[in-house]
Image (cartoon, coloured by chain):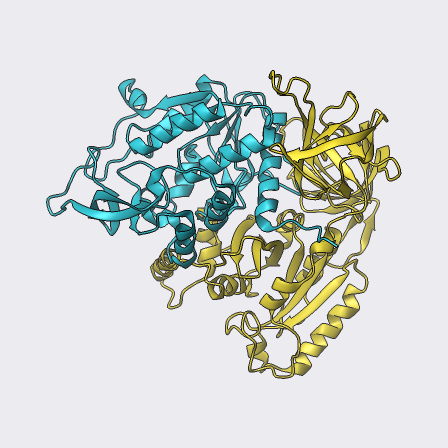
């Protein structure tokens, strides 16, 4: 006799698909926030499964900081083509040009914080009432308290102390005019779950995730790709390194790890034995102990 | 960390107050299963030093929000993850004070198992009763009572036995099927992950061993077939011109292609033509699978409808008797109109009557009350504007649960279990 239980990856998949379908059922204009990172790639894969044989019934939104890895952009365009979905782009450069935000200066300048304005402007322009993202609760301590359906007020703000209770699988997406929701279908996945799922489903990823040679600099213990967006300090020098990325953010703030892992199996082996969190390589989280919570309250991803 | 692909997932909840060692226990489980990373530990060490502590405060690891860290308490439910080669675990970590009953209820709603911490020096306290009552109310199938701080009572078998006896006496009044006891010291690590050398008299398993092996496959209802329809999938493409699939999650029973089914509320009958996901056929679909189902006949079906088997149907009714946990600052009065959510259905509802309130510390019923306030648990009668297709919560946690939404604020104000 067979056992009637789901292995954990199947259970997590079923949960995510349920949430994605709830979003389409409960909201008028949902969208998927696509960063080009593995989590949002997994999310678009889940969305495809949720509605097959119909196409994904919502657009992907990409907030282009202008500092993206070229590999990410090429991958995004190919995926959009393959899925046959609409791509909406929000440009941080445009927000800067329009004077909506002011670019940071100095050697640690990044466009990470500026994205929030562009994101909120884009959601408003397209009247998006539910923006799905690939954030996970295991990533960061403020995200550990995030709901699947996360309410945002008319300023796009998150109020962590006043979140709606979320019970069983009854998700409350009701809102007033001008408010919107952020929805996180893979809330309960860990980094390992994501990798195992990518392997099991044979999901294609940008080449950045696999071991490659690259010109890098080391700043505050973080390996950064050398690019036109980065200003070298006098003592810093460019070195050729064999690296790969565990997350995919902007070039000037996403740290690489030294790695020879060039297959999914090798990456899973590496993730299993690694002793730092994946966001440990993100300079944007190192701006203080509550950096993520503070940005999330403003309307960050 | 595990690299197994086919592990079961166990969701458990912990409730606890300051000083009862909950954070230490979670820290111990995460640490000993190697789920804490170096940069997380470094951050916690730095914060502990900044606060002037001469020890590493593991609770800083589990308290996420700024206000929580400032006040040194857990306010909200936090979810944590760890894995062993045997299983994957999701912890719903909740505060234990009475003013956070609603958070405990939230954490308990999806849990297979509850850990209840008892301080060996203090024995059973009001909060033990409260946490146990919530576990029983939310029908968490398994409870583990951890008698903690055994190191502070000289690892005394007598102390442990007395607490076990007291708890067994009290819990016989509750509806908990499976209770296990483990004497532990979360601080010293006795019987959490490693077997204790200090308590040779204890012959049971360690806490982690129990979490890894407790039988959870039977927690899910595989008898009563329930498929609430989430949405209808119609591709409108040349290739799939006539495709009409019903998307949803199986909430009970086992569905197979060829099965005769009945659709509620219309009452039409048909047979299952296919069950699939992403175009791949599924031979047997059971909870909690998300699937797409097609039927032999073209029937008008929409979100909120339920596909069931003709010989095993849920109760179709507009009158519900519910145990409610009130979650909002504004209290609930009879005759208030609300929005009720049950499976994928949403409709108007009115609270007709408040029968009684339960004192969560003593389990006594308090009758003749006019309103219920935040964190109260009460039995109420609800009338819905449309029929709902329900099972008792005891029989099915998914088709037996509701939430109430305030139509003015859109907040989730109540969580209910159908009696």
Q: On the rendered structure, is B346 left or right of A193?
A: right
Does B210 sit above or below residue A260?
below
Q: Position of residue B72 (x, y in %)?
A: 48, 56
Residue A68 in sight in this render = no
Does B204 sit above or below residue A106?
below
Residue in the image at 63% along x and 29% along y:
B410
Residue in the image at 77% along x and 64% along y:
B171
Q: Position of residue B163 (x, y in %)?
A: 70, 74
Where, quadrant-wise, is the C terminus of chain B in this rendering? Answer: top right
Q: On the rendered structure, is B57 left or right of A102?
A: right
Q: Position of residue B106 (x, y in %)?
A: 64, 46
Q: On the rendered structure, is A96 left or right of B67?
A: left
Q: Residue furthest left?
A: A234
Residue A160 in sight in this render = yes
Instruction: Please name the color used to draw chain A.
Output: cyan
Q: Which chain is yellow?
A: B
Residue in the image at 71% along x and 61% along y:
B129
Q: Position of residue B183 (x, y in %)?
A: 62, 74
């Amino acid at each position: 006799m067979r056992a009637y239980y789901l292995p954990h990856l199947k259970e997590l998949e079923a949960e995510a698909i349920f949430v994605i379908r709830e979003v389409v059922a409960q909201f008028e204009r949902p969208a998927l926030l696509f960063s080009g990172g593995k989590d949002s790639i997994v999310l678009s894969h889940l969305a495809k499964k949720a509605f097959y044989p119909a196409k994904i019934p919502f657009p992907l939104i990409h907030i282009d900081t202008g500092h993206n890895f070229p590999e990410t952009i090429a991958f995004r365009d190919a995926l959009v083509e393959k899925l046959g979905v609409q791509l909406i782009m929000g440009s941080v450069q445009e927000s800067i040009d329009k004077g909506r935000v002011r670019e940071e200066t100095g050697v640690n300048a990044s466009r990470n914080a500026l994205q929030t304005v562009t994101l909120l402007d884009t959601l408003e322009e397209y009247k998006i009432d539910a923006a799905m993202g690939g954030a996970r609760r295991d990533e960061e301590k403020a995200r550990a308290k995030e709901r699947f359906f996360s309410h945002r007020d008319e300023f796009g703000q998150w109020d962590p102390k006043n979140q709606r209770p979320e019970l069983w699988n009854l998700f409350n997406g009701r809102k007033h005019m001008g408010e919107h929701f952020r929805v996180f279908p893979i809330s309960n996945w860990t980094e390992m779950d994501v990798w195992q799922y990518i392997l099991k489903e044979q999901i294609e990823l940008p080449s950045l995730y696999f071991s490659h040679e690259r010109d890098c600099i080391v700043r505050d213990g973080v390996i950064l790709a050398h690019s036109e967006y980065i200003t070298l300090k006098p003592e810093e020098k460019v070195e050729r390194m064999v690296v790969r990325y565990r997350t995919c953010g902007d070039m000037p703030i996403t740290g690489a790890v030294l790695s020879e892992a060039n297959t999914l199996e090798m990456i899973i082996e590496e993730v299993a034995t690694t002793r730092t969190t994946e966001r440990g390589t993100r300079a944007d989280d190192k701006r203080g102990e509550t950096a993520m919570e503070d940005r999330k309250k403003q309307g960050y991803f | 960390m595990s690299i197994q692909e086919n592990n079961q997932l166990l969701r458990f909840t912990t409730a606890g107050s300051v000083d009862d060692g909950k954070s230490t226990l979670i820290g111990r489980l995460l640490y000993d299963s190697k789920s804490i990373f170096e940069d997380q530990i470094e951050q916690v060490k730095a914060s502990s030093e900044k606060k002037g502590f001469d020890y590493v405060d593991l609770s800083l690891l589990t308290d996420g929000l700024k206000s929580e860290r400032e006040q040194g308490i857990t306010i909200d439910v936090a979810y944590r993850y760890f894995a062993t080669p045997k299983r994957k675990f999701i912890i719903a970590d909740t505060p234990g004070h009475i003013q956070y009953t609603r958070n405990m209820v939230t954490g308990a709603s999806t849990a297979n198992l509850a850990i209840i911490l008892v301080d060996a020096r203090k024995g059973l306290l009001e909060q033990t009763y409260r946490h146990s009552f919530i576990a029983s109310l939310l029908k968490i199938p398994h409870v583990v009572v951890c008698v903690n701080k055994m190191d502070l009572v000289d690892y005394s078998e007598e102390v442990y036995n007395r607490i076990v006896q007291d708890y067994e006496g009290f819990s016989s009044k509750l509806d908990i099927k499976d209770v296990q006891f483990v004497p532990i010291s979360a601080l010293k690590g006795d019987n959490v992950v490693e077997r204790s050398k200090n308590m040779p008299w204890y012959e049971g398993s360690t806490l982690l061993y129990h979490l890894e092996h407790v039988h959870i496959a039977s927690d899910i209802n595989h008898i009563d077939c329930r498929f609430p329809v989430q949405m209808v999938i119609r591709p409108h493409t040349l290739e799939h011109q006539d495709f009409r699939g019903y998307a949803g999650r199986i909430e009970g029973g086992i569905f197979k292609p060829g099965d005769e089914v009945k659709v509620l509320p219309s009452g039409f009958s048909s047979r299952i033509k296919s069950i699939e996901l992403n175009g791949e056929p599924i031979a047997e679909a059971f909870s909690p699978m998300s699937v797409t189902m097609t039927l032999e006949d073209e029937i008008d079906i929409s979100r909120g409808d339920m596909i069931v088997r003709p010989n095993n149907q849920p109760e179709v009714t507009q009158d519900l008797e519910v145990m409610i946990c009130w979650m909002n600052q504004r209290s609930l009065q009879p005759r208030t109109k609300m929005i009720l959510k049950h499976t994928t259905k949403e409709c108007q509802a009115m609270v007709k009557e408040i029968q009684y309130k339960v004192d969560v510390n003593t389990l006594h019923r308090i009758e003749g009350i006019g309103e219920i306030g935040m964190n109260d648990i009460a039995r109420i009668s609800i009338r819905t504007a449309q029929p709902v297709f329900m099972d008792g919560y005891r029989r099915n946690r998914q088709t037996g649960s509701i939430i109430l939404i305030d139509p003015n604020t859109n907040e989730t104000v109540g969580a209910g279990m159908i009696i």
